[in-house]
Image (cartoon, rainbow, N blue to C red):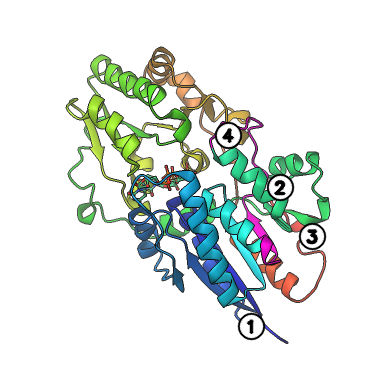
Amino acid sequence: MNKKKIAIIMGTRPEAIKMAPVVYALKQKSNYIDSIVIATAQHRQMLDQVLSLFKIVPDIDLDLMRPNQNLNDLTCRVLQLMHKTLTDVKPDMLMVQGDTTTVFAASVAAFYLKIPVAHVEAGLRSHELYNPFPEEANRRLTSVLTQIHLAPTPLAKEKLINEGTKEENIFVTGNTVVDAMSALLKAPFSFSESSIKNLPLNQYRVILVTSHRRESLGEDLKNTCLALKEIIKRFPDVMVVYPVHLNPNVRKTVMEILSDVERVALIEPVDYLCFLYLMQKAHIIVTDSGGVQEEAPTLKKPLLVLRKLTERPEAFNAGLSKIIGTSTNKIVAEISLLLTDEKAYQAMIGNNPFGDGKAAERIAELITRWVRNETPLLSSENEFKG
Ligand code: UD1
Ligand code: UDP
């Protein structure tokens, strides 16, 4: 039988982390599938960190990141270069993951060329257009252009159905981030050879922080940094480790407020293996990241989310995270509670609701069935149940 060409797109760090297991799983189906990895490189250094860790060499690299890029220019570059690339490569299907501008614009490019789109991590919704910005809109727009919706959880499927998406096109796979983590956590980690080897992680209770979202830039991010400074003042046995995102608008605020504060380690973004190690060493994780919200429960770490709402409520619904917003007082109060109240701390530890480590396997099987014209693509008994 004729093989089908499946193009896998990745632009940013989280897309690469979450698509890496899919790339490997599709390689196992090479009797049916020729997979082609296309990096838009919306991120350069942070994408390369992931690609090199997972030993993925893109077949095509559009290298389109610009310093401090704006959303409209970025969207235009993705659209133009993806039009040319898809016209040259002629894939039978495009796979995208998540909610970035790469995902949205690549899906538009594929749609205009009548190439079907499969969307990994479909159906997450905050129901507020500007929060997260622009990701809520990116994700909804991508759903409109998608033929195969790969929902990570039953809740994500429900949200798609509520919007009128046909149920027969939605498949609950689990989140591929759990697969990526499980693969890396199996291998031993060499701390002494890592970029974080000089951090005194065993001497303090570690608060691991990441914050980079566009809607938090400016005042909200400033509030977060001031809260961390206050925590350091109040708790001498605590250190903050904060890998600072390369977005210059994030770095300016964070560096201004925290660069000279004792026991605050502002470090460059670390590779995923180091970040997993840092999460394991952390006492508490404080973040506005999407991916980190899905990872912290797997590592059984209490999670404080620096957002007003989340499109990933599964951890919150299970009591494993708190959505604490970005007021300085609230952040100080919630971190202090976890540092002083063992019962409150233990109450936030439980089982990960986001995946079971088999998402990529389900996706590869389902795409293979699509290639072979078999239905259903994934039977309901094989779906991830949450
Ligand atoms: C993007 C995604 C966001 C995702 C985040 C993951 C959009 C609109 N936003 O946000 O959903 O959570 O990636 O981290 O798609 N930069 C570098 N090197 C890098 C990466 C970024 O220098 O490797 C700098 C550049 O100056 C770049 C800027 O950061 O212009 C912003 O990058 P961009 O991809 O536009 O937005 P993010 O804030 O990273
Ligand atoms: N991450 C990483 N190194 C870091 C910080 C985060 O590898 O220094 C990983 C993290 O484990 C998660 C992903 O990057 O898997 C999240 O990326 P980010 O927060 O940039 O994007 P989001 O998930 O919010 O879209």
Mark 2 residue type:
Lys
Q: Quadrant of residue 31?
A: bottom right
| Mark 2 Cβ inside 8 Å of ligand 2 | no
Q: Give the farthest residue toward the bottom.
A: 1
Q: Work out whether 201 lies above or below 72.
A: above
Q: CA distance from mark 1 to mark 4?
A: 38 Å
Q: Secondary structure under badge 4?
A: helix
On residue 379, the disc is: 3
User: For this view, does 353 lie left or right of residue 66?
Assistant: right
- Residue pointed to by mark 2: 385
- Residue pointed to by mark 1: 31
Q: Quadrant of residue 34?
A: bottom right
Q: Are marks 4 and 2 in contact (CB under 8 Å)?
A: no
Q: Residues within 10 Å of mark 3 (few under 14, many from 20)?
A: few
Q: Nearer the viewer, mark 3 or mark 1?
A: 1
* First along the sequence among labels 3 and 1: 1
Q: Quadrant of the N terminus?
A: bottom right
Q: Nearer the viewer, residue 97 or 319?
A: 97
Task: Measuring from the top left, give residue 169's x and y in whole percent.
Answer: 78, 56
Task: Measuring from the top left, give residue 163's x and y in whole percent.
Answer: 78, 40
Q: Residue 124: say if magenta.
A: yes
Q: Nearer the viewer, mark 1 or mark 2?
A: 1
Q: Work out whether 263 lies above or below 271.
A: above
Task: Measuring from the top left, give residue 83's x and y in whole percent.
Answer: 57, 66
* First along the sequence among labels 4 and 3: 4
Q: Quadrant of the C terminus?
A: top right
Q: CA distance from mark 4 to mark 2?
A: 15 Å
Q: CA distance from mark 1 to mark 2?
A: 29 Å
Q: Residue at x 64, y 41 (%)?
A: 124
User: For this view, does 131 lie left or right of residue 164?
Assistant: left
Q: Residue 192: say if magenta.
A: no
Q: For the image shown, how many numbered marks are present on the structure? A: 4
